[in-house]
Image (cartoon, helix red, strand yellow):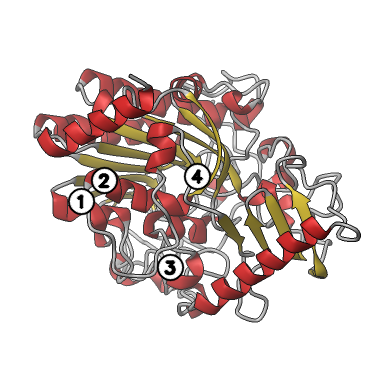
Amino acid sequence: MNFRLLTFLNLLLFSTCSSSPPNFVLLFADDLGFGDLGCFGHPSSLTPNLDRLAAAGLRFTDFYCTSPVCSPSRASLLTGRYQTRSGVYPGVLYPGSRGGLPLNETTIAEVLKPLGYATAAVGKWHLGFGANGMFLPTKQGFDQYLGIPYSHDMGPCWNLTCFPPDVKCFGMCDVGTVTVPLMHNEVIKQQPVNFLDLERAYSDFATNFITTSAKKKQPFFLYYPSHHTHYPQYAGPGAAGRSLRGPFGDALLELDNTIGNLLATLEETGMINNTLVFFTSDNGPELMRMSRGGNSGPLKCGKGTTYEGGMREPAIAYWPGTIRPGVTHEMASTLDILPTIAGLAGATLPQVMLDGVDMTDILINQGKSKRETMMFYPTDPSEKYGLFALRLGKYKAHFYTRGATHSGSTPDQDCPAFAVLKAHDPPVMYDLEADPSENYPLYLEGRPDIQAVLEQIKNVKEKFEASMVFGESQISKGTDPNLAPCCNPQCSPRPSCCHC
């Protein structure tokens, strides 16, 4: 009996007889490039647990996020919708932002809750804090939350230390705002957070959540959006100085260690064969930080750009006994995670326009993707410019190109911020199978086959943009320093008094 048929029969048996719905662990790295993991070719990264997932699971070569910066990418991951629909644009949310992921958007956690799932988030939220914490994970379907509500550089650098404790991390952070808090559900547990103990706290919280859910025989969804490997990097004593790659490698190793703890807990509780573990990242590497900013491997540019390096991510799906080891070149996206989880759990999809498709056939059968296109919006999408690029099959057309500050410090002159916005008519086209580095534009002259593809791309673009309804921009609502989380909200003077 071939594997595909056997797997189908197993899933059929599961759906009709099992009283144990599948569990889901969603791992989301920060500013991690396509070339940053050992299993994706980096020669000095130390990622034994992620390498194990890749060796025993399914590794994606053509997996995309939806934005080359944090907040909009996370919104799309959790809702299965482009960030333009939910209004999480332009750019990212800040400690005092008035807006956040709208509460009428449906997250993966909210999709699973009606089926009795326990839900928890641990790590970097970055989808808004708001008045009285109105945008925190506990308002978006998560039963529990432990983490930081935004990026760890969105506060003074003085409390961000490396190991040993007297060595300050290199780099600039935000000044004039509160120190970075650690939230437990909706309460500030620590401000400023102790970064050297943070990953251990995350690991303990997440493993306890899995263990408790297993004892209750309750299906669970764990969302772990890590701070690692966003700049400036930090690592506690269990990882600092232990990699060959310096601070970036140490931070990556600490993330990998936590993933190892989660896998060990799944094994100890007997949940490992009934749990889909999915790993990917929010956007490409911050190349302006040079060796401390990550690596996009063979891909062009990085964070902040709509080139491949900004939005094509490493991705791994792991589910022993259900997903066989291998590599898929099928196109997939963070948008597809919500409908896939919903399908596997037997949950009802939100009654809204979804941009994701179910990728179960890719996971279970290493079959074909239902995704034929990928849309590329810049960090500041607008109806005026629309899509910057569109991928159809193996072809990608750039209608606009622009560099980004995040992708500075690279020899490629198309990547830094001084590569200003440029319109392309006709669009610049690449064959991403032959040229994933986007080095060699395709010539249209004398190529009726390529011209026909371009016309098809234009038609798809026109149809998609006609269907796109831009949500009210949450980030354009501005900021109010008084909304920034403070453990002593009535204290003075702010922000320095926000300390507990």
At mark 2, the secondary structure is strand
Q: Is residue 60 above or below residue 179?
A: above
Amino acid type, mark 1: Asp
Decide which of 35, 323 is in the foreground and name it.
Answer: 323
Mark 4 is on which residue type? Asn
- Among the two numbered marks 3 and 4 on one chain, the one whose residue lies closer to the N terminus: 4
Helix, strand, or loop for circle 4? helix
Disc on the earlier residue, 1 or 3: 1
Circle number at residue 298: none
Q: Position of residue 93 (x, y in %)?
A: 49, 64
The reply to whether callout 1 and callout 3 are in contact (CB within 8 Å) is no
* Left or right side of 193 for 208: left
Label 1, on which residue?
A: 143
Question: Which quadrant: the N terminus?
Answer: top left
Question: Of label 4 and label 2, which has the lower sequence position?
Answer: 2
For marks 2 and 1, the one nearer the N-term is 2
**Which label's residue is closer to the chain start, 2 or 3?**
2
* 387 lies above or below 219: below
Q: CA distance from mark 1 to mark 3?
A: 34 Å
Q: Which residue is mark 4?
A: 159
Q: Which residue is mark 3?
A: 493
Residue holding disc 2: 120
Q: CA distance from mark 4 to mark 2?
A: 27 Å
Q: CA distance from mark 3 to mark 4?
A: 19 Å
Marks 2,3: beta carbons within 8 A? no
- The local crowd at label 3, few if under 14, some if 14 to 19, many if 20 or more residues have their Cα within 10 Å, is few
- Of helix, strand and loop, which one carries label 3? loop
